[in-house]
Image (cartoon, grey):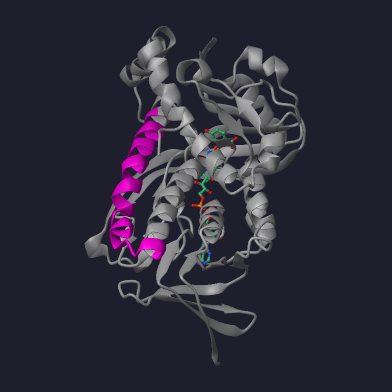
Amino acid sequence: MSEREDKTQVCIVGAGPAGLLLGHLLRAEGIDCVVLERQSPDYVLGRIRAGVLEQVTVGLMERLGLDSRLKAEGLIHDGFNLADGERLIRIDIADLTGRHVVVYGQTELTRDLMDASAERGLTVVYEANDVALHDVESDAPFVTYEKDGQAHRVSARIVVGCDGFHGPSRRVIPAGVAREYEREYPFGWLGILADVPPCNHELIYANHERGFALASQRSEVRSRYYIDVPLTEKLEDWPDDRVWDELAIRLGPEAAANITRGPSIEKSIAPLRSYVFAPMRHGNLLLCGDAAHIVPPTGAKGLNLAASDVHYAAEALTAFFRRNDADAVAGYSDRALARVWKAERFSWSLTRLMHRFPEDGPFERAMQVAELDYIASSRAAQTSIAENYVGLPV
Ligand code: RFL
Ligand code: PHB
């Protein structure tokens, strides 16, 4: 089979939020790039994931001029709540930090980026099979793939892996030059999406003796809820009524009284993991987003970390292609990792605080209660949580 060859400056693997954001930022700087995605657009949009955007993510959409729907439909949240039995601790992020977060689904953000691709001259190849990276240590790396029976090769100067946790990019980096840091959790989050009004105008993260629960939302008429379940649980054992019953118990009586039940339009179980792959650059390959790191969803950090990686990567690549500044590319990993580790710490500590771990005894539970008491009574403790939740500076 003859191979069709394309030349570009940057080949991006993966058209999730990281890949699409980076592609648009590079195009805005006049840098040529091609994005290769294994799935179809509908499949990518069907994955229900993040819901809470930090300023870094909103800021990139503003810079691209792709923020009109986000501004019109995104919900500004000035606070969120930690529930512990009967008690509700409100973290007033606006008062404590002067900032806010925006509730706007990852699906909607991805759709906005997808819809603008053609008009902005961003080439995205969907349903690209067998994507493989080659010669990333050289100055002439290339990526091969197959589509509709035709073999393709994209020759580039830089390759960026935005292909999520299971993608091929990270795997071409030799084990001897990198290090993996990993923590698995003994539970997953069972999520349910339903077209019903949320039970509360702000998010509630609950630590109940039966386990964790989160009341979140996508809009005033669409709710997203989660409960933690052992990894051995099967989705078919969780009909909607059982999920609603469990949420009503774990979220506490006040929230329960306001829950509107309805049929699920999506239901899935996601395992929880903390993971960092370092360094995030090898030769002329950069990694962004879930390709390099995973956080448990408790801090709402995953998508936002992907966005901050992309911010650093776009700066480095602009310096490289505009001013031939190779140091900017060399420095990418250290800049990105400094922020990644802080988000890893916050996500891990909020997960630790809000979940009942099977191995925990009375001492560990007493530590949770003491920490929640401290948070409830200390503005300093609340400020620390708020500044992490709203997003550390890039
Ligand atoms: P993605 O979104 O996984 O996109 C990677 C893309 O790469 C493609 N791909 C390939 N393409 C070509 N060839 C291959 N061989 C390929 N292999 C994979 C994939 O098809 C995909 O399109 O990674 P990206 O762009 O780095 O974005 C990361 C975010 O998606 C992720 O961190 C967040 O969704 C995490 N997350 C949350 N983050 C937040 O900031 N706030 C939240 O509230 C939040 N909630 C969540 C979450 C993740 C969840 N799950 C299911 C893991 C809630 C949940 C339940
Ligand atoms: C969500 O709405 O999907 C969501 C919100 C907050 C989190 C995680 C997920 O911490």
Q: Quadrant of residue 77?
A: top right
Q: Is residue 322 magenta?
A: yes
User: Residue at 44% across / 45% down in the picture?
Assistant: 308
Residue at the location (26% across, 58% down)? 178
Q: Residue furthest left?
A: 176
Q: From the viewer's perspective, is 268 left or right of 176?
A: right
Is residue 319 found inside the magenta-colored segment of the image? no
Query: How far across and how far down the image is residue 18, in percent?
Result: 51, 53
The picture places residue 61, in percent across and down from the top left corner, at 58, 45
Seen at 42% across and 58% down, the residue is: 318
Residue 110 versus residue 362: which sits nearer the camera? 110
Q: Nearer the viewer, residue 35 or 251?
A: 35
| Quarter of the rendering occupied by the C terminus | top left
Using residue 18 as the reference point, say whether residue 219 is left or right of it: right
Q: Which residues lie in the magenta part?
A: 321-349
Asked whether residue 118 is in view, the answer is yes
Q: Residue at x 37, y 29 (%)?
A: 349
**Quadrant placement of the N terminus:** bottom right
Q: Quadrant of residue 348?
A: top left
